[in-house]
Amino acid sequence: MNFDFSDDAKALGEQAKKLFADKAGTAPARKAMASGAPDFDAGLWAEIANLGWTAARVPEAHGGLGMSAEESCQLAEAAGAALAVVPLVSTLLATEALLIAGTEAQQAKYFPGIADGSLIAVPAWNEPGAVTPATVATTASGHTLTGSKAPVPDLPGAHLAIVAAAGPDGPSLWIVDLNDALVEPVETLDLVRRHGRLTLANTPAEPLGDPAAYQAWLDRAAVILAYEAIGTASAAMDMTVEYAKTRIAFGQTIGRYQGVKHKCADMFIKIELARAHALHGVAMIGSDGAELRQAAAAARVASLDALSFTAEETVQLHGGIGFTWESDCQFYYRRARALTASLAARGWWADRLVRALELRNRAAA
Amino acid sequence: MDFNDTPQEAEYRAKARAWLEDNAAEYREPPETAWKLDEFIQRSKAWQAKKFAAGYTGITWPKAFGGQGLGPMQSIIYGQEESRFHAPSGLYSIGLGMCIPTVFTHGSAEIAERYVPKALVGDEVWCQLFSEPSAGSDLAGIRTRAVQDGDEWVIDGQKVWTSFAHASDYGIVVTRTDPSVPKHKGLTMFIVDMKAPGVEVRGIKQMSGGSDFNEVFFTGVRVKDTHRLGDVGNGWKVALTTLMHERLAVGGKPRHAPGYETLMKLARGVEAPVGGPAIEAGDVRQRIAQSYINDQGIKLTQMRALSALSRGQMPGPEQSISKVVVAKTMQEMASFALDLAGGDGFVTGADGDPELAKLQGSYLGAAGLRIAGGTDEILRNIIAERVLGLPGDLRPDKDKPFNAAA
Ligand SMILES: Cc1cc2nc3c(=O)[nH]c(=O)nc-3n(C[C@H](O)[C@H](O)[C@H](O)COP(=O)(O)OP(=O)(O)OC[C@H]3O[C@@H](n4cnc5c(N)ncnc54)[C@H](O)[C@@H]3O)c2cc1C
């Protein structure tokens, strides 16, 4: 049995953690927060592209490295841990959409730019007032879209949006050239990652696959985003554990108190359970297993549960300092909201999980 | 990445499966009514002897003692295959899982030769005599005394919660041999004959209705010095060997514990408090999803550990998360399921529903599972201290002589 990442994927993950440890993390996040500028860290982005991370999943025929989903997940985890101010995870998600649903011509047109980092493509899923992928208000008519997408992570500075819009057969994905659309920055609870609003008014768009492809993309996106959440949660846990080893109250380090210790243990338990489900998800992407839907939904729910618990208790266990602007706690606390909103509500995924289990039961019966 | 066995593992699994098909057929289904103690013991012994003859006991143990000298993967594979049946093997889980590895790690060669093979065949049943009325989580606080008398020791004191003491031939017992040194230092471990004069076993009725555990009283019980395990005063270290094996042996999901499937099946058949099939109610679906996350999450976590094992790495104390999650999830699921069933969920006996009776059994059993083999609280301490590196609890009695500590 080998229920684990490949050595190659692990090596890439290590490389990513190292680079992010030097170039990302809470100090640059704080700078980004202070600057309020609507763009991302272009220097870091260039470095990432140079290292081939944007090319990881792009097929070799289109200028990429043709790696497996495992590599994307390792990158997403490292990016999540570092709170990196680059559109890496969005790019990985957009790449999956093109992989699943792109025609040969679409792949030839977009992949080389994605691979070398010059073309930034981001999924635009959220809509004002909508919380589930079933209730998409943006509509497709012919090859144009009308509607509004917000808040969209990493939208400012991107070139291409992969947009979910409702057609006659249900919601599916479309490609929009952002030169043709109105992009404005949107303020969100996450003061580090940039978000935007995309306004579409009979905006030209190319169809990207059918409604089934959209559903398949949601599964893959859920797995990659689970790793991003696990990365963020682990970083918050590590910071908390370190603090608990040094902060003294009543004559001893607070980490000696079980009220503190047991919360840290619970963070670990929730994160490990999420890891197990997320790994199951990656394995199912790799093998195109029928269990992908259930594994992906479980990974999504478990990772969001781990993240919100960890982010909330991170502030709590830091005490008063944790509630200050100066403390790094707020980055995790705020990011937890961003990642929860990044792809349909937790409840929708829990329901999708049970639906998948029901289907499997029916198939088995 | 794959979930598949290596070719060698697959070969071992296929052989084990074929053997079980031929030999465990009568245990394909659980017994209609629970076996009485005598029948349980007799069936357990017969099943153990059969396994021994076929080479499916002591799979990881040294060949010198009748073991198979194979790796942990083979042992786990056999366990997975056997768990598809309902063969009676619980009687031996403490002896073979915890006691005997302690015996051959710390006992003399003669002692190992005398006891290990008989335990393997199933002729002799073992129990673990650690806990005392005032020393459970705080195991090093035990008071049962052993005093040397020539080449023998005399044991006096009381143990409690000793599983299967009433069916056991031998036990490993932790005693205090020097109360004038700090509590972890003055301990010594022995093998004790449960039929020896002065050993009295009194059954305790459990909250769940069964009587699997006991009080054990020692009054002037004589044990030969040859039956000492490890050096005098070194009993804590020996006990840690047992506890380490306990951590590996506990933590899996009990065979009859409900899974998320049980919850789904039930939720399809009953009505939600707000009307309509329960399975369509939002809160019920959330609970099912949560159960799946925990239930399946532990299975997958164990597969991650197995993958490490199959590469020759030891699984870490991370495994402690398994028991915390399994026991509490079992309790939550059973309680939620019984809730869903309304009044029926609480009727027992002839008027009760057999499916719900299983859940009632889980509900009661889970309460014990959260305590046995380390409580939820102690396991959280282990995770926090050994995995996350947080400092240990403050122990005011740690360096004081045992008989001077409050
Ligand atoms: C079904 C069953 C079978 C058993 N079989 C055996 C057996 O075969 N052999 C054997 O030797 N023992 C056996 N035991 C005993 C078992 O190991 C102990 O019951 C267990 O370790 C708890 O000890 P205790 O009962 O003394 O509770 P206590 O240690 O008194 O604990 C009481 C409460 O205090 C909490 N607590 C204690 N210390 C701490 C701490 N440091 N931090 C936080 N909370 C703490 C506990 O978590 C618990 O909630 C069995 C128990 C059960 C339930």
Image (spheres, coloured by chain):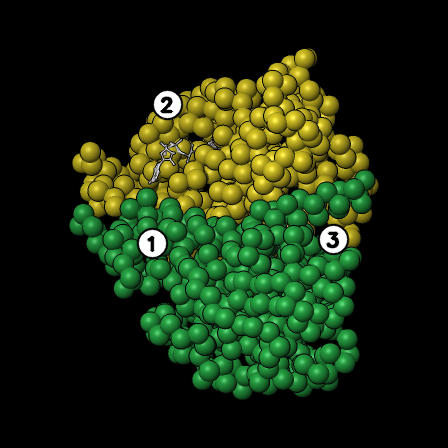
Residue mark closest to the camera, 3 vs 2: 3
Between B259 and A58, which is closer to the camera in this rendering? A58
Type of the residue with mark 2: Thr
Quick one: SS at disc 3? helix
Foreground residue among B246 and A250: A250
Q: Residue B202: percent from the left, percent from the top?
A: 47, 19
Q: Residues within 10 Å of mark 1 (few under 14, many from 20)?
A: many
Q: Is residue B341 above or below residue B107?
A: above
CA distance for labels 1 and 2? 56 Å
One can see residue B305 in this view: no
Image position, residue A28 (x, y; %): 37, 74
Q: Which label lies toward us, 1 or 2?
A: 1
Q: Disc 3 or disc 1, which is closer to the eye?
A: 1
| Kind of residue sitting beneath label 3 | Arg
Residue marked by disc 1 = A315
Find numbered disc 2 in the image and state the secondary structure of the residue it sits on: strand
| Marked residue chain, label 2 | B
Q: Left or right: A59 with respect to A234?
A: right
Q: Residue A253: tell me if it is visible.
A: yes
The crowd level at tag 3 (other Cα within 10 Å; few <14, some 14-19, many 20+) is some
Q: Decide if residue B80 is on the left or right side of residue A345.
A: right
First in residue order: circle 3 vs circle 2: 3
The location of residue B135, given as percent across then percent down, is 34, 33
The colour one sees for chain A in the rendered image is green
Give the spatial CA distance, label 3 vs label 2. 48 Å
Q: How many marks?
A: 3
Tag 1: amino acid: Val
Write down the residue under mark 2: B219
> Splitting the image into 4 quarters, where does residue B254 fall?
top right
Neighbours of disc 2 within 10 Å: few (<14), some (14-19), many (20+): some
Residue that label 3 marks: B13
